Amino acid sequence: MNTSGGLTITIATEGDVAQILTFIKALAEYERLADSVVATEEGLRATLFGPRPYAECVIARWNGEPAGFALFFHNYSTFLGRPGLYLEDLFVKPELRGKGVGRSLLSYLANIALERNCGRLEWSVLDWNASAIGFYRSLGAEPLEEWTIFRLKGEALSRLAGH
Amino acid sequence: MNTSGGLTITIATEGDVAQILTFIKALAEYERLADSVVATEEGLRATLFGPRPYAECVIARWNGEPAGFALFFHNYSTFLGRPGLYLEDLFVKPELRGKGVGRSLLSYLANIALERNCGRLEWSVLDWNASAIGFYRSLGAEPLEEWTIFRLKGEALSRLAGH
């Protein structure tokens, strides 16, 4: 747990699943991708808190009220021969922004990254999100402009698998 | 194990560490990033085959000779509420290209993705690598043009952690 003023950050547990889904939906709304969310409490419970957790989650509270969350997992750098930490989602409720909640969540993850001997903390940002980009640059983060992510899913994925 | 003609694909074990490092260095050379490789056999052994493996690796052999490799880990989609498979490295020796080794490695990973109920197979590609991009598009993969990866490392990472 990490406390600063009215802010508390804790590792999420199974009892937080409903809150996590609420945050995921609010983030999707902000990213103008609300239609893309098909996650369910059941799915989150199975994949985050089951026998093989695929990601980890921390929750920030402001004066006890859920304020935001960060969800992350380990990626890997073959060039370093070490794991990294990849931040998949970072969200702070609009009405609780400007209090340092987002920065505290990132700082919390930076500590986890160093504790676990990770070489890097990475994440992706939508190109139009200028305020987020300015914030990330102010932390010293650098954009990997020359890389593009490719995604294979659905029928194309099944076809490649030979199914 | 997966065999097709002279091609064999197997899950890498600790005994393959030296070969994996050779592939990593050859890939870095191809990406014009050879100076960035600081990985060691010891580091790979600890992080890939230790008590907490951070990534998995498969090796392709052509008529018994090491031909290429793929290294991958699980990422996570909060919108799907499911894990995905992220391909960090894919490499085939230049003299063994054109035999379907790269496609077979990707197909092998697509099978693992489906077996583990992953919603997506993703990877990143350098913008100048037109032949790779053409190949990925031919598989039905789509570029996520609107996203940029940010990276925090070194002193900036320590500063954010408050160290």
Image (tube, coloured by chain):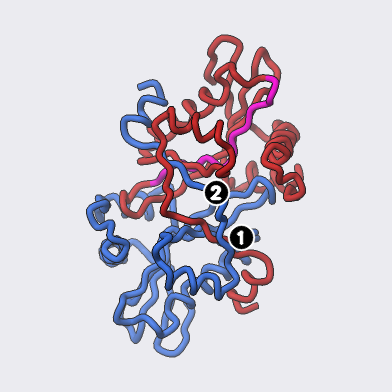
Chain colours: A blue, B red
Amino acid, disc 2: Trp
**The N terminus of chain B lies in quadrant:** top right
Q: Amino acid at mark 1?
A: Arg
Depth check: B91 or A6 in front? B91
Are discs 1 and 2 less than 8 Å apart at CB?
no
Mark seen at residue A145: none
Q: Is residue A49 magenta?
A: no
Q: Which residues are magenta?
A: B83-95
Q: Position of residue A15 (x, y in %)?
A: 30, 65
Q: Quadrant of residue B85?
A: top left
Q: Residues within 10 Å of mark 2 (few under 14, many from 20)?
A: some
Q: Which residue is mark 1?
A: A120
Residue B27 percent coordinates (x, y): 68, 37
Residue B162: percent from the left, percent from the top? 61, 79
Q: State the SS at label 2.
A: strand
Q: Identify the residue position indicated by label 2 in the image.
A: A147
**In the image as oriented, which residue stretches furthest toward the top?**
B5
